[in-house]
Amino acid sequence: MRMKLIGLGLAVVVLALLPVPLSEFRTVQLATVGAYFIAILGVDVLTGHSGQISLGHGAFIAVGAYTTAILMANHGVQDYWTIPIAAGVAGGVGLVAGVPALRLSGLYLALATFGIAIAFPTILKKFDHFTGGSTGITLFGKPTQTGHGAGVLGLTNNEWLYALTWTVAVVCFLIVWWLVESRFGRSLRAVRDSELAAAASGINRSAYKVAAFGISAAFAGVAGALLAINIAYVSPDTFPIQLSLFLLVGAVVGFFGSIWGAVLGALLIQFLPDIVGLIPHVNTKQAGPTTFFYGLVLVVLMLALPLVLRAGAAIANRGYSRAQ
Amino acid sequence: MTNFLQQVVSGLASGGIYGSLALAIVIIHRSTGVINFAQGEMATLSAFVCWTLLDHGWSFWPAFAVTLVLSFAGGVAIQQVLIRPLQGSPLLGIVILTIGLLIAINGLTTWIWGGAAKQFAGPFSTSPINVDGVAFSKQDIGVIAVSVVVVVLVGLLFTRTKAGLGLRAAAVNPVEARLVGVRVAAMLAVGWGLAAALGAVAGVMAAPSLFLEPNMMQTVLLYSFAAAVLGGMDSPVGAVVGGLLLGVLLNLTGTYVHWIGGELRLATALAVILGVLLVRPAGLFGRTAVRRV
Amino acid sequence: MTRNLCALVVAALALAGVATATTTGTPGVSSSTITIGSSGPLTGEAAAAAGVLKGADAYFKYVNSRGGVNGRKIEFKYLDDAYDPAQTVQNVRELIQQDNVFALFSVVGTNSNLAIRDFVNAAGVPQVFSAAGATTFGRDYAKYPWTIGYLPPYAEEGALYAKQILATSAKTAKIAVLYQSDDYGKDLLSGFRRGLGSKARSLIVQTVGYDPTTSDVQSQVAQLKASGANTLMIFAFGKFAIQSFVYANKLGWKPQIYVNDVASASSIMALDPAKTAEGSISILWGKDPATPKFKGDAGVALAGKIIKRYVPGGNPSDGFLVAGMAEAFSFVDALKAAGKNLTRKGLMTAVTHMNESSNPFLIPGVKVHTTPTFRYPISAVQLQRWHQGHWVPFGGVVSTKP
């Protein structure tokens, strides 16, 4: 525990100093990484700890982003105050979605949420009086934008976005940490590992699973709010199925259930295009190669994961026998 | 009335495509319990292979036959290299792997063939046949006929051949099947190969009317999921009937429910998926209910 | 614990705020280079439009091979946004903040240009000759002084088709409209309605929209046919336009078809296997290399030479490539006019004082003319009719001034 706290402290120091050597653009890219990080934390809670899969988290992100955009553009709410509201709205939607999800086994939940991710942008476009349709909503220069895009508190705009996002991200991380270490987290995993045993020990399985859905969606909502604030623009095409799938890639990279690994996954989502660009003779002007490598990473990880887990178990066992 | 019939006819033509892909999804699902999310992209890849052969001056039917063989081999290879090592691990892991495959194949086709739409000369004429004001083309009839013929062939394969019996046995009870001498591992590979070939049929049938590009089957995949769910996830006949029904349903709701219009077709398919899964998980033709947790 | 962490964050961030370097001189301009940037759909359903960027890039390379502009070579960096405006925003940020581009040139797509407009105007970066036809890019210069479009406004294009229908078949026309249900399609539709004026209500019998993420427009075309229309307006893009031709043919429907400029490039039209497009009407302003009339034309010959040399695998009859070259030619003209001492303000002055009649890639009679209060570089077009696999211009050059 103490080691983890020290690790966290170090991470925060690194985070705080990181923008110093980096360019403006890298800084704002890292802000985007922060938003992905939060979304992946949410996927971790849902898939890693409660065993439910969602391929539709892009839709919850969209709910959060649109909550923020509509509040900022039409209702004069300051950008950072929209974040908790976006969490609440997306979380509420998540709770509602979690109830029917109870009736679906993993495979069919994957299928249904995949459908949601594909169809959601067209639904956003349909309600164009509310969402601005395919034109989207521009937030840049709105009075509710802190610093009006010109920076604040002696920070440039990009540094401010970075600071805001990662401050929220650290808070989210602490919340998730507390959640998974708490009694709630243990019960959640008990439900995941054995429905029967959990029921026998008096845990209300349904309540836990629905709660996990709501919490996970709330994190996605926060991520959406921050993406909207960072990009200062939302449109339905910003939340394609690819976003949901990339989140899954990120979550797998971070290993399901390991909230520390989430940051790795978030970095990968943002920087894989740059990494692919380093391969000689690969033209990253076309999205093809980058997309191919996203997929390849996921395939390879899924193939390697059982090996990694088995190896881990073997090492753990050896340690155990030595201790004996 | 003419408009109504017209919409039904062109709905059936689209539905034939949804049904063919749904059939591929169902074949894999009933033999391995996995939902293959990459089925649509595999079909697109097959269509691109066929297009490349046509582009090199091949005539259609030889190109199609070679495409089917290559797709079958590709399906077997995917099962052998990627799926088999995961046998026995949680199904969800395999499903996530197929999602990785979806992304990777989409990237690959974009990488190789570029993003622009390509013309794909199909085997059937598109010149119109007019019956009492309702028009359709040989292409429409061809697509519907091919999907029906394919499902009949698949049915015969499963019920009348030893290999089919083996396939079913391996799916229903792999342990006992192995005891009576069925080569279960080989059967599972054949199942993937078969599905890939069926997907190739869907892709090649779709390409002339949808125009070939890397994302061609992305929305079709959702329609095919809806078709498979509607028909019952383990019923081949249900998949094709579900596809045809869905094609008609989407056209009619798009035409007559003004609020849905042309813009909410995807959302309608989603509603079908959710509605069937929650209300009647077995679908129209499924024997066993989708497992509830 | 948490409070301490917060304090730490704030302290470190304050530290971070101090250390930002500033650059002097004009960004993106060195003694030997000018760096400009763009963003467009290199992949996805609108990928055909990427030809504009490739064509422009090829023309810049050609200019560079002949010594560049005022002794400087043009470096053109364009990124893929897959037609997602939010990705355009991120690309443009990268171009401005990371690559320090001098100006944005020919960003593709109405929504994409709208999404970045506030940002680039606040940053004071020229957003020049956008490959988008919304009227607002020419009209709202008071609010957005750094933005200027290039294409003839879509709304005027729609109005032009209305005029043509009123002139040729006002008595008999029953019009069906297929439109892409976004700004682009709706702009064309509203201009068309305006052009028909009081007749719009009686002449238009059916309008149907489609979402560009859909797989096909088969059902929509069947619906339009059932309306009994004899005239079909296709306000669509790429494969959806061709699908419309093919489906109309499959249904045995032979209406008079009008297809909007962006969807009517010969390279797209050639995808129609059924030759249903015969007799369709569209507009042109750039020279279409596939048009027989321009065989032997010096501009088309030059374009062919440049494509062969600088666009590997490029289709020499791709109208998007030539459109991109036309834009690039005007841009190079503006750069020349802006002089050796190149500034962003100087570029804006140049692009708003265009009087260019020598653009070899534009059809005869179409000039690039702008003033600080008239910002529609292309404001004249000609009608054309599809005949035996080619576009054939007819009538004179007509104005599309709003």
Image: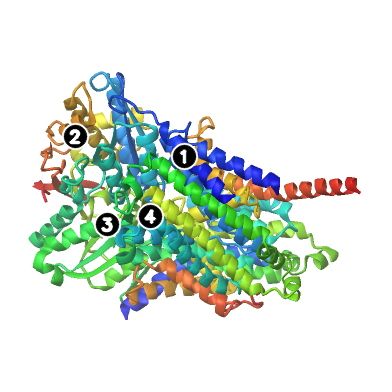
Mark closest to the chain's N terminus, 1 or 3: 1
**Residue at 74% across, 48% down:** A307
Mark closest to the chain's N terminus, 3 or 2: 3
Give, as a three-letter code, the residue at label 3: Asp
Give, as a three-letter code, the residue at label 4: Asp
Q: Residue tagged by mark 4?
A: A79
Give coordinates of residue B198: x percent, y percent: 58, 60
Q: Is residue B206 visible?
A: yes
**Residue at 66% across, 77% down:** B288
Give, as a three-letter code, the residue at label 2: Met
Give, as a three-letter code, the residue at label 1: Leu
Which mark is drawn over residue C348? 2
Q: Residue tagged by mark 1?
A: C13
Q: Is residue B173 above or below residue C3?
A: below
Instruction: Kindly check if marks 3 and 2 are in contact, taking CB atoms under 8 A apart as contact.
Output: no
Same-chain check, marks 1 and 3: yes
Q: Is residue B69 left or right of residue B122?
A: right
> Quadrant of residue C278 in the image?
bottom left
Q: Secondary structure at mark 2?
A: helix
